[in-house]
Amino acid sequence: MKDDQRAIAKLQQLAADSGLDIAGGSVRRSSSRFCLGVEHGDYNGTELFGVGTDRFIWLAFKPNESGLVRLFSGNFPSERIVSFKTGEVPPPQSSAIADTWARFPFGVDHILRREGIPLSKGADIVLYGNIPGGGMSRSASLTLNLILSLLDANGIEIAEPMRIAKLAQAVENDYIGSPCGLLDQIMILFAKQGMGTHYNPLDGSISYVPLGTDAIDFRIVGLDTGTVRPGLEKSTYRIRRIECDEFAAMLGPEFGLSCLADVRSQKLYDRIIDTFRESHPNHCSRLRYIYHAQQRFSSMLKAWKSGDVVTVGRLFREDGIGLRDDYRISGPELESMCDIARTVPGVLGERMLGGGDKGAAGALVRADSVENLEAAVRTGYPRAHPAYADAFAVHTCRIVDGIKTLKGSLGG
């Protein structure tokens, strides 16, 4: 794969420039993700479905006996080499590291030690990625890659993949202070080439769903607005998480609910809306999105299995309108991308992606319409948001494995 070859050459150059030793080491590649449903459903208890996409973080590592973890990121060269002794990292949610990428490796070391998996060996690590910043799960991809690679460097194996996903979530929740659910970690860690990943929270199961054989030729497209979104802990995501948790706790005693996804029947939904419409209109609006997203989910899964991509796209578009109007977690740049995409014949559906506010939108597009979409974005988006005229990008993606080790790529 040419992208892998170019990335490995870049990693080797980064190692040479920074003086880190990765010769004979290993390279692990972690993907981005594209959620088809339910965005923001993980912390509300819904089923989840998505795919791994080919925007990656490539990480090269070689263990050492010094106990020092030394890292250099090609995406954040101004932060230079991050170096720490295993077991000696800043405390969780330290203000000194709140705006640095180093909080991720620090958090991995902290959480592994807290969970009884202390690292003893150090490693030299260089990394580079091309995942847009916001919407396609760059932070989850990075955290998973760091966990797997540092465990590998220390000869530690964790047999249960879901534990890895939960460790990655803990890094973001407990160390960084980002209130993310498990959607991103699951959709990357379990992703398989050419398959959709279905997670059922009722039994914790993962299943793989092939796209129906009658599917038209289509592409998944990421529409990077060029905006920089702060961490989820500093965004509207945090507010929505609090609202949903508050409403679920409020509903629990009277309606016997543990999360908003427990509202599955029309009768119960109507009763709750009638009861709280006047006193808690915002909470009702959040429930409205989750309830209807769950109704769409089963239809979307059925359409995917049958290869009815047109229906998948239509439901994806409806989901985006719900995220915009009911969940209210989108942003002006994201909606400009969606508005432009919606005008292009052959775009089957579009919506914002990920945590919201800023970052990337996404679209499902007939293969022969991708060039027209790119042209429309090149023309329309800079006019709508001239401040980002040199920062936006269009990414045409394939469905790929979430985690892959590129064996023998560094020699040795």
Image: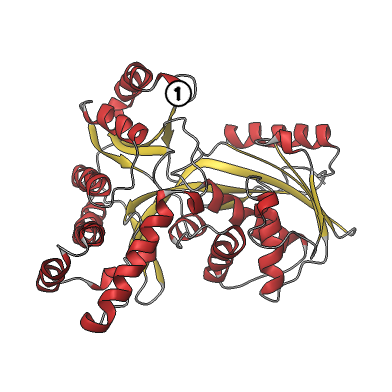
Q: In the rendered image, is residue 30 in sight?
A: yes
The residue located at (58%, 65%) in the rendering is 174
* Position in image of residue 121 (x %, y %): 83, 62
Q: How many numbered callouts?
A: 1
Q: Residue furthest front?
A: 279
Q: In the rendered image, is residue 354 in sight?
A: no
**Type of colouring:** secondary structure
* Position in image of residue 49 (x %, y %): 35, 57
The residue located at (43%, 56%) in the rendering is 238
- Report which quarter residue 240 is drawn in: bottom left
* Position in image of residue 405 (x %, y %): 64, 51
Asked which secondary structure carries label 1, the reply is helix
Q: Reply above or below: 325 against 365.
A: below
Residue tagged 1: 388
For label 1, the crowd category at 10 Å Cα-Cα, with few meaning under 14, some 14 to 19 and many 20 or more, is: some
Q: Reply above or below: 77 against 279.
A: above
Q: Nearer the viewer, residue 91 or 370?
A: 91
Quarter of the image containing the N terminus? top right
Q: Residue furthest right?
A: 66
The residue located at (64%, 31%) in the rendering is 6
Q: Is residue 304 left or right of residue 44?
A: left
Q: Is residue 285 left or right of residue 208?
A: left
Q: Nearer the viewer, residue 17 or 62?
A: 17
- Report which quarter residue 295 is drawn in: bottom left
- Report which quarter residue 164 is drawn in: bottom right
Q: Amino acid at mark 1?
A: Tyr
Q: Is residue 287 left or right of residue 171?
A: left
